[in-house]
Image: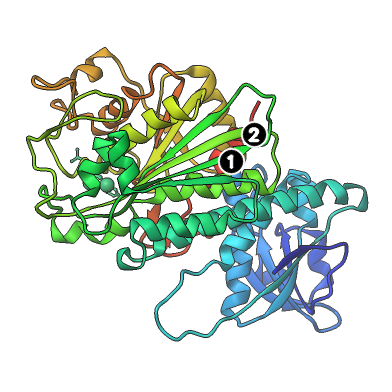
Amino acid sequence: MIQLKHAGTKDVTVFFCHGDSKKLKEFSEGTERLFQGEFLQTAWTTDKEGRLVLLTGMGEAGQEVIRLKELGAAAVKECRGKKITGFSMDITEIVEEYGTESVRHITEGAILGTYEQKVFKDKEENPLEIEIVGIASEDFEEAQKLFQETVTVTEGICFARDMVNLPGNHLRPEDFAKSIMEFVKDTEIETELLDLSVLKEKGMQGLLGVGESSQYPPCLLVLRYKGDPKGTRNTGLIGKGVTCDTGGYCLKPANSMLGIKGDMAGGAAVCGAMYALAKNKMPVNAVAVVPMCENRISSGSLLPGDVIGSYAGKTIEVVNTDAEGRLILADAVSYAVREEGVTEVLDIATLTGAVVNMFGFTVTGAVCDNDEMYERFEKAYTYSGERCWRIPFYKEHEKMIESKIADVRNLSNGGCGTITAGLFIRAFAEEHPWLHLDIAGTAWVDDPIFEFQSCGATGAGVSSIYRFCCER
Ligand code: BES
Ligand code: ZN
Ligand code: ZN
C-alpha cells in the first residue's frame, strides 16, 4: 500500500538528502559523521523526539532517472530488511533538485522495491505501508496525477514480472492468455482469443509450426484499446509469448535451459503496457497481439531443413528450430497489419543471445526503419528510465536471411544475429513503420543490477511502451 500525503503519520521516516543537508542538524548528534550523503548510502538515526529516521544519500546532483528509481527502492529495501511495516518517505530535497516529476521515479522505485516473486513454499507475508510526503501544497495536485499514473504503470510492470517468473508448468500458453484476460477484465480493453482451430483456419503456419510441438496447444491473444476513436494512429504491439523454449530439435544445452520459462517476457510487457493505457484512460489507440506456444520436441515438431508457409503466404526455410520466436512473431505481425489495421508495428521479444553478448543485461537492443518512430521511442525510454540502443541495418544484412529454397530463412548465414532476427520480422510488417525491441538481456536478472530489481523478471519494456503510445 502506497499513498501520497501532505504529512506523514508513521513513526519511521526516510529522508533523502545530501551530506551537507541542513536537515541533518535535526537528528541525534554524530549523524554527520556517519553519513556523507553518498548515492544510496544509508544510515539509521533518531530525531529529537526519539523517532527512527533513515537517511538515504542522494549523491551528486543531476542523477539519471534510473538512479532516482533506485533511491526509492533502496529505502524500501532497507526498511523491509529491518522488518519495519510502515514509514513515510520525505522527498523534499529530491523535489527541490529534480522537480515534481521526480514523484514518478520515487513512486515506481518504491513499489518495485517491495516486489517479491511468488515462491512455492511457506513464507511470511510482510505488507508495507508507505507514505510519500514533502510536496509543496501548490504542487500537490500535479504530483497526485503523476503518482496515480505511475502506480498503474507499476501494476503493469509487476504483472509482467509475475507472468515471467511463473515456471513453465504453471503457465501453459492457454493459462497465459487467461491470466491476461483476467488482469485486464475491469478495463476498457476488448479481448479476443484465437484457439488452435482458428489458427488452423487462418493458416498461421509459423505459430502452428512451433506450437504443435507440444500437447499444450498454441493460441493467439488480441487486446484492443480505443482511447481515441477519432484518431488515425493505431499502434500495433506484438509480443513474443513462448511459455517454454527448449530449442526444439536444435535443443538448448542443459546449462542454458533455466531461462526458458521467461521467453514470454515480450508478450507480458505489451499486456502490462496495454493495461496501464486503459486504466489511465489515455487518449490513444493500441492493439496488442501475442502469439503463445511452447517450443518442444515431439513428432509434431519442426525439423531443421523444413519449409513452412505463413499467414502472409511467404514460405520460410526453418534452418534452426531454436529460432522460433521470429516464426510466431511473423504471423502475429501480419495478423496485426491485415486484420487489426495497425498503422505502425512495435514488436518486443526475448529473441537473441547475440543481444546479450552485445549489451549485457541492462540495455535493450532496438532495430527500427523509421526515424520519427524511433525518436518517439527514445523520448519514451528516457522518460521512463530504461536503457535502449539502436542498432543499424543495411541491404547486406537483408541478404543474410535470403533462402535458396524459400522466400526467407530463419537463421542468418552471416552472423549479426540481433539485426537479422529483427529483419526477418520486418519482412512481415508490410512497409509499416517498424520498431523492434530485443529484450533477451534485459527481461531477466539472476542477481539484481539496480535496486528496483529483484531476482528474476524485470518487467522490461512495460513503462517505455506505455509512454511510447502516449507520445504525440
Ligand atoms: N529465446 C531465445 C533467445 C534467448 C537467449 C533469450 C538467451 C534469453 C536468453 C531464442 O528463441 C533463441 O533461442 N535464439 C537463438 C537464435 C539462433 C538459433 C539463431 C539464439 O539467440 O541463440
Ligand atoms: Zn529459441
Ligand atoms: Zn525463444
Quadrant where the N terminus is found in the figure: bottom right
On the image, the x and y values in percent for residue 89 come to 74, 65
- The answer to which image quadrant residue 266 occupies is top left
One can see residue 458 in this view: yes
Looking at the image, the residue that sits furthest to the top is 395
On the image, the x and y values in percent for residue 10 come to 80, 77
On the image, the x and y values in percent for residue 414 come to 15, 25
Q: Is residue 22 above or below residue 419?
A: below
Please give the name of the residue rendered at 19% of the width and 25% of the height, measured from the top-left corner.
315
Q: Secondary structure at mark 2?
A: helix
Residue pointed to by mark 1: 466
Task: Give yes or no for contact between labels 1 and 2 (Cβ–Cβ under 8 Å).
Answer: yes
Please give the name of the residue rendered at 52% of the width and 22% of the height, measured from the top-left corner.
343
Q: From the Cβ of disc 2, is ligand 1 less than 8 Å away? A: no
Q: Nearer the viewer, residue 295 or 143?
A: 295
On the image, the x and y values in percent for residue 432 come to 44, 19
The amino acid type found where label 1 is placed reads Tyr
- The answer to which image quadrant residue 257 occupies is bottom left
| 370 on left or right of 54 | left
Please give the name of the residue rendered at 40% of the width and 50% of the height, measured from the top-left corner.
265
Q: Give neighbour class at mark 2: few <14, some 14-19, many 20+ (Cα, 10 Å).
A: some
The amino acid type found where label 2 is placed reads Cys
Residue pointed to by mark 2: 470
